[in-house]
């Protein structure tokens, strides 16, 4: 089996090249071809010696993920469904905005945390993605979009690890993937523009702060343990006080001086004024001086079997106002791409039941089904 070069960060690729008797600067050249130019074929790497290209052909490949489908929403959001084998699929979503292009990336097929309001959680856990499978989403999307928009410039300026899966439960694969996103010879994204979102895997938050500090979003969803135990089951292992301590420790290393708290607005469950009051108290007083933070309120995106409802717009606005009036910067997430099921928590990528997915896909107007080879192997 040849090595998939998408699995390596630059240090890893340098070590691999060393086994071939090649110097580090060759690895840098190769890495730039792959990530900056989107190359998937060694023959196009014209500044590498023919002998090296022949060696690479024998031992390495650059293999993306096969694309099952691509949907473009009326608002410009594009969702790709990638095949990760054995009936599993994961999704990546591109969200264009005036001043940035954000790619939402998956870290696992399914998720073991099992949050009540999340369709990925309801689906259960299939497996961790490899580093190469995480990077492949960005590699494919960036170079597809450059061709699509006919530009040589970078299209994706921000990455959020907010697709399927709990990134901090796939730590070993996550960190080299983040390094490739950050590397100047890779995608060159600043640490502030790469966000890991976690349900609160406390020990791994500490490790991330040391190994690869990037912006951190924490999925809070409740102001007290009893409710959070119920909504985000990992809270039983790492309750709020431990989670908020970990947030403050993270901020000692973080590229931003605040944590973003995500809060999914569920009608009658966590959206009442008393919840806002408890939240304000919690983030203000925790540990004495509180946790420097911003809030991002996410209107719940319903899916069948959740048994939950989205808070009304008025309720979301009222909640946001209570937090803002207390001096906490609060934004309400725009729901983007909901006509293509690409909004938060709607990323149910299980294709085991092909018929169901196909029926759903057929209902959508803007469907383009690409040939499986688009993911491209070398
Ligand atoms: N596992 C990580 C990252 C992926 S989920 C985490 O939980 O943080 C990304 C965000 O989408 C999280 O804040 C999550 O709570 C939120 N989310 C999940 N399901 C949702 C739904 N149905 N409606 C709105 N937001 C949802
Ligand atoms: Fe997993 Fe995040 Fe969904 Fe919870 S919200 S089940 S942690 S993907």
Image (tube, rainbow, N blue to C red):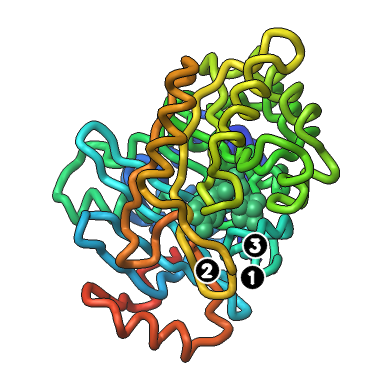
Which residue, as the protein is rendered here, is positioned at the far bottom?
355
Q: CA distance from mark 1 to mark 2?
A: 7 Å
Residues at discs 1 and 3 in contact (Cβ within 8 Å): yes
Which residue, as the protein is rendered here, is positioned at the far right?
237
**Residue 6 in view in this figure:** no
Q: CA distance from mark 1 to mark 3?
A: 5 Å
Q: Residue at x 69, y 52 (%)?
A: 231
Q: Nearer the viewer, residue 120 or 21?
A: 120
Callout 3 secondary element:
helix
Residue pointed to by mark 2? 348
**Residue 285 in view in this figure:** yes
Where residue 46 appears, as percent x and y from the top left, is: 31, 46
- The answer to whether 377 is drawn above or below residue 344 in the figure is below
Q: Is mark 3 within 8 Å of ligand 2?
A: yes
Where residue 264 appears, as percent x and y from the top left, is: 53, 47
Q: Residue at x 47, y 87 (%)?
A: 356
Residue 121's tag is: 3
Q: Is residue 247 left or right of residue 74?
A: right
Q: Nearer the viewer, residue 192 or 258?
A: 258
Mark 2: give few (<14), some (14-19) or many (20+) Cα within 10 Å: many
User: In the rendered picture of this protein, how many numbered marks are placed on residues?
Assistant: 3
Q: Residue at x 50, y 30 (%)?
A: 295
Q: Quadrant of the C terminus?
A: bottom left
Q: Nearer the viewer, residue 34 or 69?
A: 69
Q: Is residue 164 left or right of residue 92?
A: right
Residue pointed to by mark 1? 123
| First along the sequence among labels 2 and 3 | 3
Mark 1: give few (<14), some (14-19) or many (20+) Cα within 10 Å: some
């Amino acid at each position: 089996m040849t090595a998939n070069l998408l699995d390596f960060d630059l240090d890893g690729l340098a070590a691999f090249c060393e086994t071939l008797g090649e110097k580090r600067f060759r690895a840098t050249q190769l890495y730039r071809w792959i990530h900056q130019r989107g190359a998937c074929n060694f023959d196009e790497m014209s500044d590498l010696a023919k002998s090296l290209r022949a060696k690479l052909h024998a031992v390495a490949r650059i293999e993306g993920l096969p694309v099952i489908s691509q949907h473009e929403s009326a608002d410009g959001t594009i969702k790709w469904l990638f095949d990760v084998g054995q009936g599993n699929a994961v999704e990546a979503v591109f969200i264009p905005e005036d001043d940035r292009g954000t790619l939402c990336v998956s870290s696992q097929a399914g998720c073991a945390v099992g949050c009540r309001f999340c369709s990925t959680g309801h689906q259960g856990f299939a497996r961790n993605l490899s580093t190469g499978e995480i990077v492949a989403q960005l590699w494919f999307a960036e170079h597809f979009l450059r061709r699509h928009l006919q530009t040589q410039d970078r299209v994706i300026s921000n990455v959020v690890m907010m697709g399927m899966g709990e990134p901090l439960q796939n730590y070993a694969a996550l960190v080299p993937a983040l390094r490739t996103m950050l590397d100047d010879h890779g995608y060159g994204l600043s640490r502030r523009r790469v966000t890991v979102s976690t349900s609160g895997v406390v020990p791994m938050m500490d490790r991330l702060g040391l190994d690869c500090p990037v912006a951190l979003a924490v999925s809070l969803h409740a102001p007290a343990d009893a409710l959070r135990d119920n909504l985000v089951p990992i809270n039983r292992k790492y309750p709020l006080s431990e989670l908020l301590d970990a947030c403050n420790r993270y901020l000692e290393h973080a590229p931003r001086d605040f944590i973003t708290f995500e809060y999914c607005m569920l009608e009658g469950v966590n959206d009442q004024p008393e919840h806002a009051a408890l939240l304000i108290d919690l983030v203000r007083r925790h540990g004495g001086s509180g946790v420097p933070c911003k809030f991002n309120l996410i209107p719940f995106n319903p899916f069948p079997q959740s048994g939950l409802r989205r808070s009304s717009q008025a309720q979301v606005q009222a909640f946001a106002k209570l937090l803002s009036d207390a001096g906490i910067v609060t934004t309400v997430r725009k729901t983007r791409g909901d006509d293509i099921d690409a909004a938060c928590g709607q990323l149910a990528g299980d294709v085991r039941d092909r018929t169901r997915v196909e029926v759903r896909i057929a209902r959508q107007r803007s469907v383009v089904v690409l040939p499986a080879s688009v993911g491209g192997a070398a």
